Amino acid sequence: MNPASSTRGTVKERADIALNDDFLRNAVRFTTDRLRSGKKVASTEHGNWEEWRERGRQIRLHTIAHLDYYLNLFVENARSNGVHVHFADNAVEATDIVMTIARQKEAQSVIKSKSMVSEEVHINQALELSGIEAIESDLGEYIIQLAGEGPSHIVIPAIHKNRYQIAELLSEDAGETLEPDTTILAGYVRRKLRQKFLEADIGMTGCNFAIAETGSMVLFENEGNARMVTTVPKTQITLMGMERIVPSWADLEVMATLLPRSATGQRLTMYMSGITGPKRTVDADGPEEMHIIIVDNGRSQQLGDPEFQELLNCIRCGACLNVCPVYRQIGGHSYGGTYSGPIGAVLTPALNKNVAEWDDIASASSLCGACYEACPVKIPLHDMLVSLRRRKVERGHGDKLEALGMRGFATLMANSKRFALAMRLGKIAQKPFVHNSGIHLKLGPLKGWNTYRVAPTLANHSFRDQWKELSAETAAQPKTIDPAVRQRMEQVLADRQHNKSTSRTGGESHE
Amino acid sequence: MSNTNQPFSAKPPVVPNPESSHLTPDHEQHDSSQADWLDELEQKSKAKQQTFMNHIADRLQRPRIQEAPKHPFRGAPEIWQDFNWNEAEKIEKFTKHFTEVGGNVLRMQTLEEAGAFIAEQSRLLNAQYIVRQQLPETEALTLEARLPHVQISAWNSHTEEAWKARAAEADIGIVLADGAAAYTGTVMVTSSASQGRSVSLLPTVCIVLLPIERLQTRLGELLIPWDSKGRENLPAGIHFISGPSRSSDIENELTIGVHGPGIVYTLLIG
């Protein structure tokens, strides 16, 4: 459970390790394929997907733009429901509040359901330092906790482990050999954790959505462990990112439509629970005491930033991971932070503002825009990645060699005589390095490219060299285009303009 | 761990009453030794709340918003609000969707018929313990009479029992749905004194009684009413269940019954 260990080195070094692990690459690809096609089926089946996306985006935009109002409303209502609400500016404060509660409760063990915020503030380490057992109860999280690793996917945290590795980990935990059979392994975890649930002093959860108007918190899950955590232990602590708010239960319908379909292709997760305060006096189960810790930890830095405010619209579905060609190759751990994939590449540097350490993960993207297409609330992640790169260069953290190269390129391209001269010199200079009509040299600026590819040579007779003949040739031909072609082109243009004027504001389709 | 096999007439069910004290949250019941540190945290929290909210407004470069803002995009798209299936379609879709994810749906005419079915299943599964919500509908199943050798408890029928342990050891839990949505194949159960959250969660098998008139088309039909019910009238737990507990965390292979019930029946009554 020490993500710090996975953050060592650059994103490139971590990716190199991941790229050499065949199982990891296959598993990530297989899983992301499954989730991606599941989403496609579910969103198509639902119909009007674009309209729902736009609605989801509008609700998130509205809530974040009025976050002080809605968050305050949530806090007041949750308090009236009997919840103890706390505020944490950063990870240290969040941890302190949890530790205060745990000490007062003289807690021996804390049982947790999946919470990315708790990963973000490293709560397990803090508890364990104080001798309090912290147990992850989500099957995948339990497995990676035994392995001492962090999650590699928002939705499927143990995506990188195969059943043999899992059987080994669980056998060690059980003190007996367990067959590498999914049913046996899951059955063992069910029995083991059932006991832990009944013994635990504190249950700790994350929060998918918090409903401002009634002070309720909502959890989506498939295993039932989040329900266990909010039903069995006497004390419940919920860690909630400050942006998790939706105004009403009516708005929850939109989120409940978008989140499961985008995350796993389900119509709805097997369980969705709305928890409104601790158990009532006459109830015989549910937590007697309930705490909600509202965590900032870098989130408020995105507010008022025109390029990054929309980052707070994220509903943590992981759809952007499943479509990302880079994530699909290198897996989640290569990103080095709590959040991986395109959302992680933006969120991690944004939440850790000015931490030079994270600068390189903004480069782990091909800027293809598939993440934006997949995002159920239409966050323009690829634009944000460009902004991040630009800010990095503006702050003077850019690659010096690259900047020099770009300046040289600009000088060269600005003047045709200079360019022609350079090409003539280049044709001569490349001669010693050309083999089989390609350049294989792995030195200097060519190293990065030529490690996996072969650079093409400069042509003997370039397009520019041929231009005189070619322009003469085209000048000799009739200038009118085929009327059929012309008509088709005009139709395309008219359609495009028509679509543009009738489409709703914001979120043009990505072209 | 004494279990009771009470005839259902032993105690009247606790009927939820919004006027009564059952809605008092438990935080008002703490003894004074606990109150000290909680009070201290509470004071800290209230002091911090203002700076926290002011900071958000500052970042958004405007004064604090105190009045409810206009929310033109509230809830699902308008076309969706008019989408409704007729009863036959609702039954067909609910059955299809709940079954597709591994649940079971059966149509029953009466609670009497449901009781006979549950008794038969209990014998097949060799159930030793059953826990049911303490409601007229689950009482009308007359399971106590049908299964004299099975220990059947009605949730929270007396205060001295360790009810969570009762539910944890139960083979079958029986609950009444407060509503259902055909579109997602979801049943809704709520918590109260007589309706433990554990009953639909801890037993190996969960049986949900769904009166047919409570079956709606859209999930929104179950969610939106909570907006107008009034915060103080919401139950502590509102649970939406769409099938058996499941996980695909090990090599993407589907496993059923990870933490919650692996076998789930919805009995459509009426």
Image (cartoon, coloured by chain):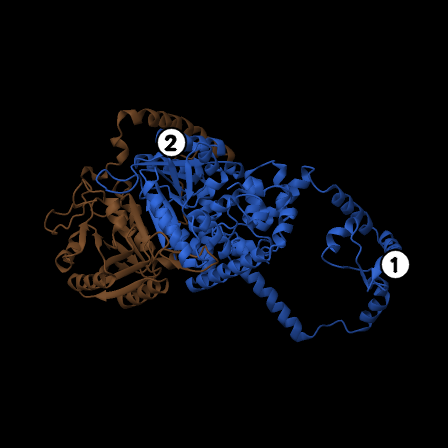
Chain colours: A blue, B brown
Name the outermost residue toward the front.
A176
Q: Which mark is residue B150?
A: none
**Quadrant into which the C terminus of chain A falls:** bottom right
Residue type, numbered disc 2: Ile
Q: CA distance from mark 1 to mark 2?
A: 73 Å
Q: Position of residue B167 (x, y in %)?
A: 25, 49
Image quadrant in which you'd find residue B212: bottom left
Task: Name the residue carrying label 2.
Answer: A101
Q: Position of residue B186 (x, y in %)?
A: 32, 57
Task: Name the residue carrying label 1.
Answer: A431
Subunit that carries the residue with mark 2:
A
> Is A144 on the left-hand or right-hand side of A448?
left
> Is B67 on the left-hand or right-hand side of A450?
left
Is residue B168 in view? yes
Image quadrant in which you'd find residue B111: bottom left
Taking the spot 58% from the left edge, 62% from the top edge, the residue there is A496
